Amino acid sequence: MATPESETPADIFQDKFGEIPPLIGKEANFTTVTDNLFAKKLITKKEIAGITTQHNLDDNKRGSALAMHLFDKIDVDDDDKSAQCLQKICDVFESKNVNNEELKKIGADMRKKLLSTTATSQVWPTDAISSAPPQPSEPTTTQTNPNELNVGDVQKVLNALNKAMFGPTNWRSLGLSLGLIAPTLDTIGRTNGDAEDYLEKTIQKWLQRKDQVKGTTWKILKEAVASTGDNAAAGRIPSH
């Protein structure tokens, strides 16, 4: 049995394995979950068909087949890929499109454990976080700070948040901390996307310096992530 310190993403998923099949095997949940997994490239249409075309499948067996497929995706030798895969599964389980509170809770629990077991790992060198020089004050109109990010850095910021294991479901809280106002975020939330779409649009608005945004540096992003309560993710975001 793995200790908490050595627990792998596969261990985390396996701990919840007994609870997952009956939830994701229900027809409505199965369709929603597999659609989201397909969008995240965690399953192919052929693999979905391979499950649904099996004979005499009840909800639990269908869910078990899907859960085993996900476990195989997570249970790889590359720890980073394994963690990223589990994070995507958590995103799917916690998606607003999944109408099952038990499944959302499982996703949140696994994400919390994943963050706690990787809290001491560094995506960037430690000195890039702890020894970064003080950032100059951000201008309110023109971009004169060389450390400022711009609208061309959307994907760079999203990659950093993903590597830091920041949960996209916290996009609204992050947006408010970055200086966006509620009506802007309400508009984003009405675009019929998922949490990842909303997070991307939030970052775009931030980098466009909309509303009450005062700056667009890594330091500001790091502080905003911390203000959402996700200190572990904040610790993995570079300061410059």
Image (cartoon, rainbow, N blue to C red):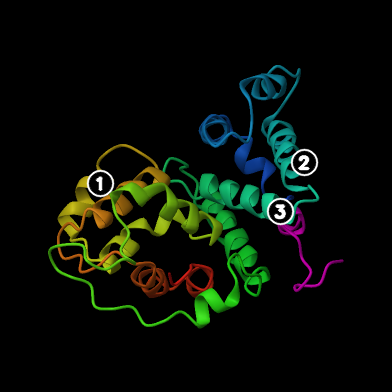
Measured as percent of width and height from the top left, residue 6 is found at 79, 69
The answer to which of 63 and 194 lies nearer the viewer is: 194
User: Residue 30's quadrant in the figure?
Assistant: top right
Q: Quadrant of the N terminus?
A: bottom right
Neighbourhood count class around disc 3 (C-alpha, 10 Å): few under 14, some 14–19, many 20 upward: many
Which of pointers 3 and 2 lies earlier in the amino acid sequence? 3
Q: Tell me how many marks there are.
A: 3
Which of pointers 2 and 1 lies earlier in the amino acid sequence? 2
Measured as percent of width and height from the top left, residue 68 is found at 76, 39
In the image, the segment drawn in magenta is 1-15
Query: In the current view of this chain or complex, which residue is farthest to the right?
Result: 1
Q: Is residue 17 above or below residue 33?
A: below
Which of pointers 1 and 3 lies earlier in the amino acid sequence? 3
Nearer to us: label 1 or label 3:
1
Measured as percent of width and height from the top left, residue 221 is found at 37, 67
> Distance from label 3 to label 2 (Cα)?
10 Å
Q: Which mark is residue 188?
A: 1
Q: Amino acid at mark 1?
A: Ile
Q: Is residue 217 above or below residue 203?
A: below
Horizontally, is 156 left or right of 85 in the view? left
Q: Amino acid at mark 2?
A: Asp
Q: Secondary structure at mark 1?
A: helix
Q: Which mark is residue 13?
A: 3
Residue under label 2: 72
User: Residue 121's quadrant in the figure?
Assistant: bottom right
Was residue 11 drawn as part of the magenta stretch in this picture?
yes
Q: Residue at x 33, y 78 (%)?
A: 135
Q: Residue at x 14, y 60 (%)?
A: 211
